[in-house]
Amino acid sequence: MWTILYEIVFSSVFLLLSTLVLLYFYGVRTYGFWKKRGVPYVEPKYPFFGNTFETALSIKPAYVAQLEIYKRFIGQRFVGVFTFTNPTLFVRDPELVEAVMIKDFTSFYNRGTASNHEQEPLSAHLFHLENQKWKILRQKLSPTFTSGKLKGMHQQLVDCSDALVKYINGFAVRDEPVEMREVMAKFTTDVIGSCAFGLNTNAMSDPDSEFRKNGRKIFESSIKRRFFSLLKMNFPQLQKYVNLKSIDQSTEDFFMNLVKSTMLYREANNVTRNDFVQLLMELKKQEQNLTKTDQQDEDELIIDDKIIAANAFVFFVAGFETTASTLSYCLYELSLNQEIQEQAYQHVVSVLSKHGGQVSYEAIREMTFLKQIFSETLRKYPPVPELLRKSTKDYVIPGTSVAIPKGTRVTIPVYSLHYDSKYFPEPEKFKPERFDREKNKIKIGTYLPFGDGPRICIGERFAKMEIQVALVKLLTKYRFTLNSKTISPLVYNSSTILLMPIGGIWIDLHKRDE
């Protein structure tokens, strides 16, 4: 009996140890990738995690980990790292950034963030789509952001900005500080609701606004959510077996039903608006005459209700959080730099006086100093601290004999480039004059708040116009100072890829004389 028991225990231990050994070697199987190619690299510490152990478990913010690598390899054009087990090219050199984003774009036009569109219908949008489908959709959506279309949305931005001023006036009257990130998130929610969906979302006036509730859910941060997000991106095959959905089911249902009901109402009542959903509806109508053969082409992209919902959703997601953050950080910096704030105020007043006091489209275009201010804000606080690409073909890195195979991931450390004193002297200082085009020229590949090249953020111009209109309205009504409730210097949440300050940004309002 003891012999049998011994054999069972021995077999079990042997099987366990064998399994652990196999798992270990499987988890480190790619770790010789960069060494074989003679590329300097960061030695991975753990199986499976590569160099992402601390960021995956939210021990350290991703931008901090990247900044450490960036500074450690001064003098190197690129470095090898491992995102979990995936070999990833970490690009430090602006010229190589330019090659990846622009010159050799055809070798890197995918982000490597593709999702399971059947499992997550709201992921079938411009950010995630790849290959020919991305190219087709980009071409179809580009007309949304022409100068003519943007000019047509200008008054909606003015109206929403007036509502913002009215909303925060209550805080000024009560002499209460304002947590700007939450307020600006409500403001940008109303802007996107109006300009994308043609709806009054009432995020500022209604604390129970469904739009704001669902927007908040999308960006709720947690260690679990961060970890699952990285798992999904780096091991996409897991989605076949494990539910790694990024979006809460109730939020998915909310947006799917919202877009569907909006389209049904417009079609039934012959309603036409100058907004994003309307453009998508018109594209859908244009394609209804496609033949069955065309529709079966796997490289074609047919605009159906799911595609409309997904792209309306990403317009909302990309448009409200990043713009809200930029506005908040802008007011934070202006509160710390009173001389710059006063200069901005005088500049705005001067330009408006030439336009009869009206915040017109033409007046906004003349406010060059305001552009310098939000450009510097975007440098210090990039909406997305890193950009991702994935090689679509074998590629030899220019000026070297290093070849990376198709499917290799590439990361561009935006935050690190923005804080490199070689390109931006005294990077910790807020200096809008860096973006005075008559005095300074920004080196290509060093300033990337919206990305660059053919895959640059399609809503860049809309976001900039929205920020400017809001700043004009705010600066003409209030002077801003920093409230002691703000943790300064800012400390960021480590469980999200975005720069989210712990404790928020609290600002005191001081009404200007009319």
Image (cartoon, rainbow, N blue to C red):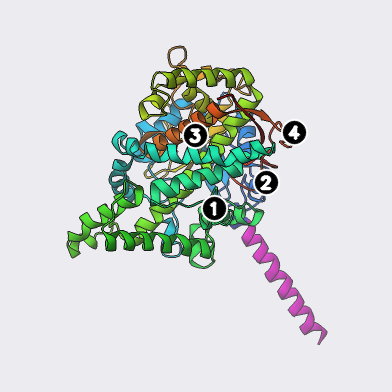
Q: Nearer the viewer, mark 2 or mark 4?
A: 4
**Residue 487 located left or right of residue 2:** left
Which of the two discs, 3 and 2, labels the residue nearer the N terminus?
2
- The residue identified by callout 4 is 484
Do the numbered discs 4 and 3 sit on residues whose CB atoms are within 8 Å? no
- The residue identified by callout 2 is 54
- The residue identified by callout 3 is 470
Q: Nearer the viewer, mark 1 or mark 2?
A: 1
Which of the two discs, 4 and 1, labels the residue nearer the N terminus?
1
Mark 4 lies on a secondary structure that is: loop
- Label 3 – label 2 distance at C-alpha: 38 Å
Which of the two discs, 1 and 2, labels the residue nearer the N terminus?
2
- Label 3 – label 1 distance at C-alpha: 19 Å
Figure quadrant of the N terminus: bottom right
Residue 5 falls inside the magenta stretch: yes
Percent of width and height locating residue 191: 45, 44
User: Start and end of the magenta stretch?
Assistant: 1-24
Which residue occupies the foreground of this view, 511 or 295?
511
**Residue 379 located left or right of residue 305:** right
Identified by mark 2, the residue type is Glu
Identified by mark 3, the residue type is Ala
Which of the two discs, 3 and 1, labels the residue nearer the N terminus?
1
- The residue identified by callout 1 is 212
Identified by mark 4, the residue type is Ser
Determine the residue located farthest toward the top in the rendered image: 439
In terms of image quadrants, where is residue 353?
Answer: top left
